[in-house]
Amino acid sequence: MSKALKIWGGFLFVTGLLTAIVFLEPTAIIMGLFLGVVPGLILYVAPSIFLYSILLTALIFLLRPVGKLRWALAPLILACVGFYIPYSANQATFNKVRELTKDDIDVASPIELGSSIALIRSSNPFRNDHGECKSLCLRLLYNGAVERVLVGTHSKRIEDASVGWHDAENFPLTAYFIETRDTCPPGPKRPSTVNQRILLGECLMSEQATIADAETIYVTEPVTGPRTFALVASRKLGDAAVFAKRTRVIRKTEDRLQTLFQKTETTAEPLFYPVLFGVIGHGSGAGISGSNAQTTLGFLRDDVVQNDLQRFKWADERRIFGDFDEPVKAPL
């Protein structure tokens, strides 16, 4: 056996051993990062290096009939395959993104809201303020944008049941409005300027209502099912699922529901360029170091968010509501 073959065999043995360590104890990557970054990075890339090394060895063996040319041809073929697979798979993934966002509608000027608007968001079991008049509700009322703001949540999970007026009978909301009184009833903590307005008799009152009472709806709703991550899917090289949710402003006309604004947030999981193979973690805890995390070796994917609704919410609401989205002003 030549010296080169011995070195290459030793390289395969070491990278294979490191891959086994990472697979059996994924937290070794975290420990390696704490020990000086470099050990952690070596463990992180070891599975990919091992996979490509095995494939390169197999190609060189199979290309023996072409002689010395195989030493250049094998790496070239491997590189082409390594980049073509994610390119092909990712095209299908991003086609899904384009399909989900193709009907989005922007606004050139603030929307005329009418006398009432329903503010509806997805229910969250970790929050207990589902029916409260929060920041946007207060701004729209005390800045005079509308006379009534209806607040509530929906438990919709997929787009097959759009939130709209046809849900009126089983979609209870809390309607808020301003009523002038000598003394206002106590309420929860609010911004100081709102409290000043309330002390002067601009009382924030509420009553039960339904979505049918609103002229306009401002809603954030899911388009696809909730985001899931199956570890078995990490071993697939095809296109990935795209998860989406959408913010809409809907107006009721005489014969139909008209969408005035629509923005769709998508979360895609494209493959890395070139194909990378490593440890993927999922479960409770902080990444692969979580106490209940599940791990597997698989093909690594990126996390690409387009039209982040939370990040750009303030800018979107300024375009939709205009000056009415300004902070509530103190009484003169």
Image: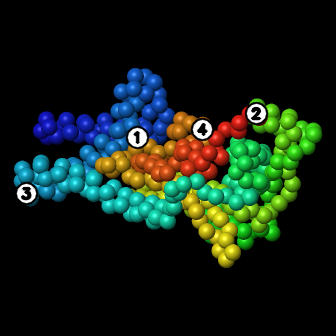
* Relative depth, front residue between 265 and 15: 265
Pick the quarter of the image with the C terminus: top right
Secondary structure beneath label 4: loop
Give how far apart the Cα atoms at labels 4 and 2 are: 51 Å
Residue under label 2, please give it. Answer: 332
Residue picked out by circle 3: 66
Q: Earlier in the sequence, mark 4 or mark 2?
A: 4
x 55%, y 45%: residue = 315
Residue that numbered label 1 is attached to? 20
Q: Determine the CA span between mark 1 and mark 2.
A: 71 Å
Distance in Å between CA atoms under marks 3 and 4 = 52 Å
Residue 283 appears in the rendering: no
First along the sequence among labels 2 and 3: 3
- Distance from Cα at disc 1 to Cα at disc 3: 34 Å
- Around disc 2, counting alpha carbons within 10 Å, would you say few (fewer than 14), some (14 to 19), or many (20 or more)? few
Vertical order, 244 against 45 (above or below): below
- Label 4: which residue? 285
Does residue 210 appear left or right of residue 145 in this picture?
right
Looking at the rendered structure, the secondary structure element under dot 2 is loop
Which is more toward the observer, 176 or 141? 141
